Image (cartoon, rainbow, N blue to C red):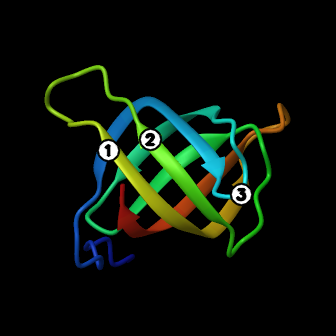
């Protein structure tokens, strides 16, 4: 059958919380929704299609004490359309904490 063992070196944590993001060249943050985070990456939903390789600043704004607020600079490594409402799943590699 399929090998379902996790192959990642750092586990993902499902968060499902608000997230703000912006291209580092922009001044205005936009709203998104974080899906999960790990020690070296983040996955979130955006209403904006981003280019792979873009450098983005994110601010994770959890509404629970089990996940602390997080600010980071990420590099977009994957962008996948998720529905017909023009939403995109954005995977980013954390380059620096902010």
Q: Is tag 1's residue or tag 2's residue first in the polypeptide sequence? A: 2
Using the image as rendered, state which of residue 84 and residue 41 is in the foreground. Answer: 41
Residue 80: % across, % down: 71, 58
Q: How far apart are the two marked residues, 1 and 2, measured between alpha carbons?
A: 6 Å
Give me the C-alpha separation between circle 1 and circle 3.
Answer: 20 Å
Which comes sooner in the sequence, label 1 or label 3?
Answer: 3
Asked whether, in this view, residue 33 is left or right of residue 87, the answer is left
Disc assigned to residue 91: none
Which mark is first along the chain, 3 or 2? Answer: 3
Rendering coords of residue 70 (x, y %): 32, 44
Circle on res. 70: 1
Question: Residue 68, position in %: x, y?
Answer: 21, 37
Q: Residue at x 22, y 70 (%)?
A: 10
Q: Position of residue 60 (x, y in %)?
A: 40, 38
In the foreground, 36 or 61:
61
Q: Which residue is mark 3?
A: 25
Residue denoted by label 2: 59
**Residue at the location (29% across, 76% down)?**
8
For the residue labelled by badge 1, is the local secondary structure a helix, a strand or a loop?
Answer: strand
The Cα–Cα distance between marks 2 and 3, rounded to whole angstroms, is: 16 Å
Q: Is residue 91 above or below residue 19?
A: below
Q: Are marks 1 and 2 in contact (CB under 8 Å)?
A: yes
Residue occupying the point 69% across, 61% down: 79
Position of the C terminus, as image quadrant, is bottom left
């Amino acid at each position: 059958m399929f090998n379902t063992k996790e192959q990642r070196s750092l586990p993902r944590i499902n968060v499902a919380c608000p997230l703000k993001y912006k291209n580092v060249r922009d001044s205005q943050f936009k709203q998104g929704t974080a899906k999960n985070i790990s020690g070296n990456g983040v996955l979130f939903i955006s209403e904006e299609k981003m280019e792979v390789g873009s450098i983005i600043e994110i601010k994770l704004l959890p509404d629970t004490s089990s996940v602390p607020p997080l600010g980071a600079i990420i590099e977009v490594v994957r962008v996948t359309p998720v529905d017909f409402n023009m939403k995109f799943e954005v995977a980013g590699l954390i380059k620096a904490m902010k």
